Every structure is written in C-alpha cells, then in structure tokens.
Amino acid sequence: MPKITIRFTQDSVPLEEERDFYLDLFRSLGLKSRMLFDEQEFEITAQTKVTLFGMETSVPQGLQTERSWVCRLIEKEGFLLFSVGGWFWAASLKNSNHLKKSSHPEEMIAKLPVDLRVLSLKQSNEVNDLRSLSSLSSLTSLNLDNCWRVTDISALSGLSNLTSINLSCCRLTDISALSGLTGLTKLDLSANYLIEDFSPLEGLIALENLNLSATGDILSQQDLFVISKLTSLTKLNLRRGGSRYEIKDLSSLSCLTNLTNLDLSDFAAITDLSPLSCLKALTVLNLTDCISIKDISPLSDLTALRDLKLFGCNSITKLDPIGKIPSLEELKFTSRRIKSVESLRNIPALREVTEFNPPEVAELLAHTAYLRSDRDCIKWYSKDWLKEAKDWREDTSSLQDRFAATLGEAFSLLGEDSIAEDYEAFLDGRPDFSSAPWKAWFGGTLKESGFVLYRQRVERVAVSQMLPSAIGGACSTLPYEDQPEWSREWLMSLEIACLSDAKKLLSVAPEICLAHARLDLSEALRRWLEAFTDPSDPGALDPVHAALAGFQLALNHLDAAESHIFAIESPSLKDPMLANLISSYPATDSDRASAQLLLIAAPATRRELAKTLVTIPEYSMSEVAMQRLVVAMDDSPEALGELIALLPPSAAPSQLIQQISASLQLDRQSTLRKISDELHQQADRLLILKK
Amino acid sequence: MPTPSRLVRVFISSTFRDFIQERDELVKKVFPELRRRAKERFVEILEVDLRWGITEEQAKGGETLRICLEEIDRCRPSAPVFFIGLLGERYGWIPEKDYFKPDVLEDPKLGWVKEHIVEGKSVTELEILHGVLRNDEMRDKAYFYFRQDGYEQRHWSKIEKHHAAANPPITREDFTNAKSENPEADEEKQRDLKRRIRDTSLQWDPKDYETPEDLAALVASDLWDAIDRLFPISAVPDALERESLEHRVFMESRTRAYVEREGLFEKLDEFFLLPNQAFRQETSADEAEQEEEDEPDSAPTPPSVRVVLGESGSGKSALLAAWLKRRDEDVAFFHFVGSTPSSVSASSLLRRMLATLRSRGVVPASEAIPHADEAMAELLPFWLEKLSERGGGILLFDAVNQLGSARDRELWWWPDKWPENIRVVFSTLPGDSLRAMEKRGWKGEEFVLRIPPFQPEEKREMINRYMKDLFAREMEANLQQLILNAPQTSNPLFLRTVLDELRVRSAFGTLEKDLDEMLSCPDPAALFVHVLKNLERDFSPPEHPDLVHRALGLMGVALRGLSENEILQLLSASPYPSGEPLPRHYWAPLYLALEESLVSREGQLSFFHDYLRSAIWREYLDEDHELETAHARLAETVTRWREPDAFGSSLRAYGFEYGIRHLLDIRRVDDATDMILDQNYRRRAVESTRQASAIEEDVSRLRRAVALQANFSHEVAALLTIQALVGKTEPECHLRSRLDAAAASGDWEEALGIAGAQEDNSLRILLACRALLQSPGVLSEIQSGQISDVTHRWAKATGKPEWEEAIHLVLEVKSQPSSP
C-alpha cells in the first residue's frame, strides 16, 4: 500500500482560523491536526475518503500515486481554496456576510479553476443563480446547504461527475434536474418543504445515502414506493421534523436490505413494524415519536442493530423484544408505561441506556459489562456505579441486593483493585443484604484471581463478626474440591465462633448446611441443624431442607433426600421436591413412589405426575401403584379417563380398572342429566299451566 | 341488635322433689322435640336448670343460687331467654340466714336477697323474684304453670312407679308442706306467691294443669309459638347467611373492650383512600392518550394490598374488626379465619367469598359457583374484575396464618393480580404465611403495617374500660400498678386474660397471689396454661375429677363449636347420653369462668383465641391416649348412627358431618370404610345434612387413607373409587325421594327444608316446585302464606322471576278446593 507524506506550506491560513477544515481533513486521514507544518505519513486506498469543507470526497486518481502532498489553504477572491501540489482540489465560499455588498458570488464562481472537484457554497445568502457552476464540469461534490435563495437547480443537470450534493434548506420545488445525475451516491434534500414530486429520484440507483428529512408532509405512500427502488441505499433519513405524519404502511421499505441507518422519526401513524424485520443490516434505527407503536417484536430480528432510539414512543409498555438483539449498544427511550429494563439484561453489548431510573440503568450496564468481560468499562465506571448503589434509596431491597451482587460479579473481574476495599466496606455496612453479593464477590474472585486472593478476601471477613451475608457468601463458594482442607478448617472456625448463636445466622442456614454436606461433615451438620431448629416455627428451616434435599438428589442419595423433603413444611417448596424425588426412584420402587405421590399437596402437580408415572409399565402392572395413581387423580371421572387413556397398550388392565369400568356403566353423567331434565320439565309444566 | 342471637335459653324454676316427673317429661321429651324442630330454623335451645340432680340442701354456701341468678342475668342482653315457673303446693326449702357467704350478700347486684332472707323466702321464690317479678323485661317471656292441688292423692300409684328408684324414697309428704318446720306458714306463703304471680301483669296468664303429660303439651305448644314468633320460617337464613352471621358475631366479639391504637386506623384509612388508579395496565391506546395529560408523572403504583403483622395477641383481629365497623359499607367481603370451624379452609373461604360477591350482585344470581377448589380460585379474578367495574371495595382476611393446611396458608387461592380499586388486607403472625407474602413482594413499610405493643396509657385505659364498663368493679391501685409494670401486659391478649382471670377469681379472695402467679408467666401461651391449671383446681367436682380436662379436650378436638347441651351429653357416663346428660350444675361454674374466653354462635361454643386452643392441645391433648379418648368419644356420635336415641339430634348431625374424620384421626380406617360403603349409612348422612355432597369429602379422605396403608384390600379401594366417581348422583336421588315423601305426607316444612339446604339457587327453587307439585290436596292459608314467603326469597336469589310466578301459580291451584 502506498504511503504518502503530507504537510502544509507556511503561507496557508493558520489553524486557529480554519480549525474545522483542518480537523476534518486530518481526522479523515487518521492524523493529528496539530502537526500542521510537520510531515506526517498516511496510507491510502481506493476507498479512502477525505473530508473537505464538510464534504466527503474520494481522492482523485492522480493524487493517489503521489509520494508527497504539499498542501496549501489560501484565501482568494472571497473563497478559501485548498490545493495539493499546486492543483486546486476544493473551494469554499467564505461566509457571505463578510462579502462586500458590491461583490457578486456568481462572478466569483466564474473565476474558480475549472477542474475543481469540491465546492461548498454553504450558507450563502447571495447565491441564487447557479448557471455559473455549469463550467465546473469536474465537480464531484457540491454543498449548497442553506443557500436559501436557490430555487432553480436546472444548471446542475450537466455536472455529470457529481457524486454528492447537499441541497439542504434550499427552496426547491422541482428536482427533475437531478434525474440525470446517475452517479450520485449521496443526496441531501432535507428541509425543502416545497418539493412536490420525488419521482426524479427514481433513476438514481447508485444512491447510498439519501436524506429526505423535513421535506414537509407531502411525502406519500407513492413516494415511499419510489424510494424503495433505490436498493443501494445504506442510509435513509425520512425524519418528518415535528409534524405528525400519516403514512401507515412501511412495507415498501422492506426491500431496502442494504440499509444500515434508518430514521423514521415522527411517523406517528405507523403501528406495524414487521416490514422492518427483514432489514438485517440495520445498525442505527431511529423511531423517535412514533407514538402509535405498541408492538416492537419485529425489532428482535434486527440482529445487527447497535443504536436504537425510541424517544416518545409512549404506547410501548415492555422492552422484551429488544432483549433479543445481542448487538445493541445504545438504547434511548422515554415511556412512562415502561416500568422495567429487566428484559435488557442479556444483551452483552449494551453500553448506554437513557431516560430511566439511573440506579437501575447503572445496575443493568454493570451487568452487561460483566457479560462481555469488559474490564475497561468496569474500571472506568466502578466508582460511579458504587456511588449509585450506595445512594439508592428504594423500598424493595431485593433490587438493591441484586445491584450489589452485580457489582460483586463485575468488580471481581478487576482482580486486585482499589475498588475492592470500597466495595467490601459498602457490603459491611449493609447487613440487610442477602448472601448473594458476597457470593458473587467471593465466587468471582476465586474464578478470576484464584485461591490466594480468594482466601485473603474470605479471611478478611472475620467469622466472629457474624455478618450473615458474608458467611453465607463464603459458605456457598468454598473450594471444596480443590482446597478441602482449608475449607474444612474454615468451617470449623465458623462453628467455634458462631454455633452458640446460630439463630442469628438463620438467614444463611441453607448455605452453611450445604457447605457441610458438600464436605461430608455430617456430625457438624447435625449440630448446626439442631442449633437452627425453632420448635415454634418448623417452617423456618424449609430452605435448609430443600437445599440439602436438592444436594442429595443430585447425588442420587434418595433416602437422605427423602428425609429432608419430608422435613419441609411449606407445600410450595415441598411439592416440586417430592415430584423430583418420585421421578428419581427406579421403576421398581413404584410402591414407595406411588405412596409419596399422595403426599403432594397441589392437586394439579399430583395429577400431572400421575399421568407420567402411569406410562411406566412397572406402575401400570402393580395393583397397589395403580390404585394410588387413581386416587391421585382425585374424584372426577374425566381425570380418571385421562389416566386410563395413558396406560401403555401392553399393560394388562388391572382388576381395579376392570371393576371401575364395569360399574361405570351406570354412567354418572347421564343420570345427572336425567335428574335435571326432569326438574326442568316440571318447571315447564308450571309455566304452561299459567298460559 | 339487627338479628337476635339464634340461641334461646329456657330457665326452669320449681321446687325439686315434687317436680321430678314434670322435669323428666320436659327434659326427655319436650325439649328434644323442640330442639329438633328449632334446628330447622337454625335455632338452638338451651334449658337452664342448675339444680337438676341435686337437692337444695346439698348446695353449699349459696354459690348455686348465686350462679343461678347470674345466669338469669347473663342471658338477657344478647340471647332471648324464657322463664318457666312450675308451682305445686309445696313452698320449698328456705335457706338459713348464715347460709350465704358474706361476699354473696355484699355483691351489689344480689344485695336485695338479704332482706328476703330475713323474711324467710324460699330458694324457688328468690328465683322467681329475680327472674320475673323484679324484672320488667321478662313480663312477656315468663310462663307459669300451676299444678292442681291434691295431685298426689289422685295419682299416687303412677307417682310411686315413676320414683321407684329414688333415694331417699319419695313420699306423699314431699308434695305438700307437711315436712316443713312451719307447714301452715309455708302454705300461706305459697298461696301468696301464686296470687302475686297472677296479679302481676304478665303477658301470658298462669295455666293450671293436672298431669305431667298435660304440662308437657302446654309447654311444648307455648314455647314453639314463642320460637315461631321470634324466628319465623320465612326468615330462616341460608348457609351463606349463617356463616356470614357467625363471622359478624366474631367481629363484634373482637371489639369488646377494644382500645383504639394511635395511628393504626389512620394508616388503614390512608390505604383505603389511595387515589383510584384502576385499570391502569389494561387501558387501550386510545384511552391511554386521553389519560396521558392528567396522569401524574411517574407516580408509583400504590400497592393494593396491606399486611397487618403482629405477634399473637397483639390485637390484629381487634384492630381489623374495629376498622371494619367504621368502614362497613366499603368492605365487600371479610373473613375471620378461626371464627368458625369451616373458616380455616381455603376451600370454604373461596366458596363464601364467591357466594358473597354473587349475593352482592357483582355477578348475576344465576352464575354458578364451581365445586372444585382450583376452579373456584380460577374464577375469582374474573369476579374481582366485575367487582372492580362496580367501583371496587375492600376485602379483608384476618389471621390467614390460622388456615388449616400449609398450602392454604401459602395463599395459593389468592390471585397474583387484581384490579387496583380492590384493596386487600391480610393479617398474619410471622411464619409461613408471612414468608409466602414476602415471596410475592409484599414487604417493606409500603405493604406491612406492624402492630406495636401496648403503651402504659393504653394499658391503663384497657384496665379501666374492662373492669368498669364490663364488670362494674374497680381495681385496687396496688394491683393495677403491678399489672402496669409487668412487661408482658404490653401484649393486649395477655393483659385481657389477666383481667379476665382476676374477674373470675375475685370470689376467691386470693387476688394478689393469683396476680403474682400470672405475672410470672413469660408470654400468653404460658399464661393460658396457668389459666387451665386454675380451672382444673377450682372447677373439678369430686364426682368428676377430670371434668375440665375432658370437657376442654373435647372442645379442642371438635370440628365445630359444641353447644352446652352437646358437651353435657358427651361428658355423660351413661350409655344413653341423650337421656342422661351430665347434670348441668357441674358444668355451669366452669362455663361461667371460661365465658370470656369463648365465643358463642347459635349456642355453639368455640375459643375466643387460638392461644387457648393451643394451650389445651399442649396440656390436655399432647398424649396419644388423650387424643384417642377425645376423638373416640366424638366418633361415637357416628359409630352409633344406628341408634337414633343415643345422642341428641344435634350431636347426631355432628356425627354424620364430622364423625368419619374423627375415626380417621384415630386410624380406624376399617370402621370408617364399613360405614361409608353401607348404603343405609350414606342415606342417613344425606338426610341429616341434606347436602348431596355430604359424604363426598369423607370418601376422598378415606380413599387416600386406604391407599396410604401398607397393604390394603383392592376390593375396598375399588369400591371407594366407584363411590367417589358416582359422587352426588346417588345422594341426589335419595334426597329427591325424601323430598317427594315429605311433600306427599304434607310435611312441607321438611320438604322446604330439604330444598332450602341446597347451595345452588336454581336447584332450591326447582326442588320447591317439585315439592309443591307432589304435595296432595289443599294448603291452608297460613301454609301457603309461609311457603310463598320462603320461595319468594329464593326466587329473588335465583335471578329468574319466572320461577316466582310459577310458584305463585301452583300455590293458587293448591290453595283452592280442587275442581275436576
């Protein structure tokens, strides 16, 4: 790749005066503008675009092969002129307010070099007649932004080299002169609210960037159809600029599959976004003030989307579909109806969310930063986030609790870092938190930095302080496989310090007991269980038994699991565990399993499980088990019928089923119907009597 | 009182040895029959006869008379009371001056007795004086019956036969004043008493009669007329109204001596008055746009639920009851768990809630309430929507921690979402209910209203209110200070119980010692155990040393409140308890002592506070044999179902309704199975409860119990399953044939009773039509009037006016002499 050196000659206009020009140019070349008169080096390709006077333009062939660009920016005849090696590339009319009253811009244009490529007449009050431009046939980029006296652009029709025109804020009515400029890739017609006919654009199939924002309320469904033919478009701006807009149907846009940027602000009438769902390349989408949109589920298909604006979309109540866009980095919305950003939690790319409760957003962004292991981001924001967490005064402490846990996860990625001390101090000051933050913090540390730092951090929290959340966090992260010795020692120190006052640790009893079970410390476990037991509220130990039962179930220790499950008082905890246990028994244990099935309190759970079990041959063949399955279905014949229908075809009908079906010849349904028919007949008889 | 209590007390006063026959006639024939008839009207009759079973001379120290007189007083304010006075020739026993203990005579309410003792009045006359002659309120409620003189001459052989077993033997002299110290004076006193009774302008003139049978007929007809006037058949409440009434009685009882707690009402009011933001989530886009402007920016959604939390006895129910009284119109439904035995199941709670919403017109009367619990719970949110459309309201659930099953306590029956203009209040203790609520996110100050302990000034107010207002006594300052200083008395229940004990024990003159003992109890639970110990010490008659133990054990185990009558039968040692209940005088002192700790509904007694129940369980039911004994005794009410006279009608009904459960509690699965599988048993049970669903639940329970046995008979299991599947079909058929038979024999009260017992509104009226069509011949004017009254109520409740027309039509046809 050829390397080119660049520098400006000393007689150029100083940096301070034309700061924007230099900044744009150097930035577009990836260089520093401060080193104006020093030589700098850059690489160039065929695609390289240079920004000159606010316009992007490609580098002419001749310059691409030069070794060195000696540049000059001079002021002459009211113009700023930019040249390379003496060849004039671009020109920009100086701010016309400074021009003398007598000077005519048209005359000045006529004096410009004829092979000029780039011309900016931006914000020229005086320019209205463009005929003088027709001689500049080499022009590729033309900026007439804010030339509000320009109404006639017919002179441009001959400038066939043009690739980029900015006609923003002119007063155009007729744009037919553009129809022949088929080389155009970029066209800005924004804020020309008098244009009536957009059909001249139809043939401009090379257009990549089209800005029709604020072209009045006249854009019609038909015009959208014209635009839909411009399939090279990557950027399309149809922002309406305030006035509410009647177009309802976006379906013609669906073929613009190259679009990366789309602005549909103020399309107040649209409700159906499904045409957008095939625009897979979209990275930026602006739907500001599309107030009728309720259903945003089509957006979940836009898997490249990085930037989404939903300001003012007040009909949206839930962000759930957006949660499925993994690439999303920025989301901006305002809607009073949106109560939660919960659904955005699994977007790893997410970096910015605005207009929502700051602590909740901070928690969300800390979480997504953790998801993508973005240590720089975490480091950068760590202090802000921690402050946000500290200052959050919210009644539902579970949210604060989660914030703290999220920060624990995220901060642990930083390894040894100054934030660690502040964070632990924050947790120390919040005894109302659960063990989750500590668990995240210790667990993350162990995973990220290894045992040494983990041990240091765990041991810093003295067990004698009896901070339940910290003890719970440590218990649930003990390295019981890799460091069993140390883990046992630590648990022993915990027991010595805290067993006598165990009730204070009741909130983390499951973690403590589970740690002992994992390390096979059954004696100590027994002591803890005893210490936790409160005869007046046996249900208080439910979570402990549930945790232990789950642990034993995972190991397939069914007897041990059973004893813990039986100790659970709360049916909403016990039922699912019982169901789990029952499903874990080998089929040969149908006797025991079916008896336990009857202990499930919730009828629906019981029936569902019975329907699963009945398909197992060992159950359908056992009289006892079948009886119990039948009882488990409760008393409705319909439910029993369901059960019978599920019997494996091979199963011999049990005596029970035979007996029942024989007796059901009575047919309960028809008997009932007979009774009610009879009653109604009598009632009718009375009414007839009356007539 | 908007509705009179459906408990009627009948006080019987007479001399003793000469009225054994009459009393037997009344107790064994008249009252059982009256009670049976009254049951149709859901009225309980209680005869009060303290001296039954003892002679006057045996009563010691005047206590009996005093209790006797107090009982008369006690019935007056709430429950209707009738006084039956039987007078023969004998004046009866006159107590000596020193017969009464000094504290009886000093009692301000009984002071008047003193002068009468000087005059040498008999105990019977004292009763009559106190009950009727000195008491204007009783003018229209007293019935006197005078036996013709010379009765014993004319009927001696019959009398002798009747009293054959009496010891000492009955003689002719027992019927006159011959044995008294001053026969002539007594004769004069008796004549004077009769004359004074005749001269007093009583509503009902005294009636003369000859034989005990004559008396029985008179009393039966007089009392039934009185009951019929008080509780006409057209005002018989249905099951829902009865249950609601019980909740209301409970509510009223909670507000006794309620001390208003600072700020708590305001907090609840505040909750109720939160701005109404109903349908916020559900509004359509158009409405949303309209409301956009007036909707305050980012106003947080106020939680539409409150949890009233406090330790046991802290006054949660009292607070809610008192608040409820103030907000009565805004409360769409309230439920005090534990106030009735059925109130502890979510199933009946749901049913009652739906039925109440329906009867309030939230949904049309023709809407059916599903049978299955889950189906009711699924329906509830829709009905709540309807309630919300009608402006919403408050739903109030007290003491959800007392719901019977753990699953119910976790509120599976309450929906996750409900309209915001429906405000819900739950009260609970810490424990599993509270944990379930926390799981739903109902925690933090926004949701939870904690009841603080009593402050000293609140304690003082309660002491004053309690002692002065309710018992017209004042407490000595040093005792009051002791109570105020004790930290436990910041628990209102503890304080209340202490005060109540002092009231009961004031007669014993050991107040200070008692108080010391009570204040050494650390908490209400211990205090109640102490109370039980006291009861046992003071109210165990030598003949029945385990009376307290047994009586309270039975009440603790019973599945609904027991009436005094039922308790006396259950305590009886006789093989036929209905004929020989435990004499009342053994039980009455215990009852009077316990009264403030009990709630009475239609005469059925249950515990005012769950603490007493748990103390009883801890003390009297903690051992297997105790439980076994209590359950077995209650189970007898059903195992002896073939013997119609073993227990009285209400205990018999109890047996059919709850007996199987008691049997299962003591693992007598086989006995229960035998009964359930006996067609005759099933018929009797259905006849008794008049509900086709009567034994459905028992069958379910039994199926489960059988299936859980290690080895069970598959034949039995299959039979039970079939029984379960057949469900209501068989009982429905049976009920219909009973209805037809009753109608055919002209017993339309029975027929309407069967129809009226049905839960389903349409079914009621259908059955009534059926009964009327079946009944032969002409109906009397009164009959048709009453039928018309009853069916009009039901027809209104069905929401189908054509039913009423139909009924009227058939009445017209039936009331005219039939023409070909």
Image (cartoon, coloured by chain):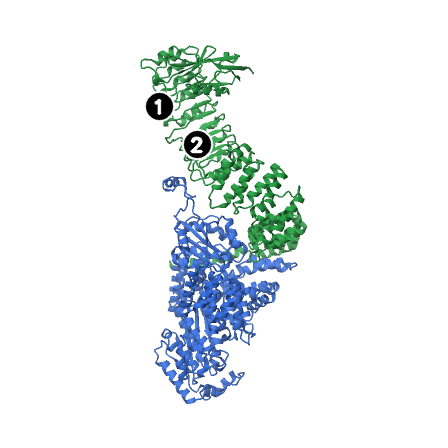
Of helix, strand and loop, which one carries label 1?
Answer: loop
Please tell me which residue lies in front, B774 or A234. A234
Q: Residue furthest left?
A: A102
Earlier residue among tags 1 and 2: 1
Whether residue B23 is situated above or below residue A264 in the rendered picture: below
Please tell me which residue lies in front, A420 or A294. A420
Residue B51 pos. (x, y %): 48, 78
Colour that chain A carries in the picture: green
- Which chain contains the residue that carries disc 2? A
Q: Are marks 1 and 2 on the same chain?
A: yes
The amino acid sitting under disc 2 is Leu
User: Pointer 2: what residue?
Assistant: A287
Please say if the residues under marks 1 and 2 sit with CB atoms less than 8 Å apart. Answer: no
The amino acid sitting under disc 1 is Leu
- Which chain contains the residue that carries disc 1? A
User: Pointer 1: what residue?
Assistant: A194
Residue B489 pos. (x, y %): 47, 62
Colour that chain B carries in the picture: blue
Whether residue A475 is situated above or below residue A23 in the rendered picture: below
Say which quarter of the image contains residue B264: bottom left
Say which quarter of the image contains residue B191: bottom left
Q: How far is mark 1 from mark 2, CA to CA?
A: 24 Å
> Would you say residue B632 is visible in this rendering?
yes
Q: Judge left or right: residue B239 versus residue A565.
A: left
> Would you say residue B646 is visible in this rendering?
no
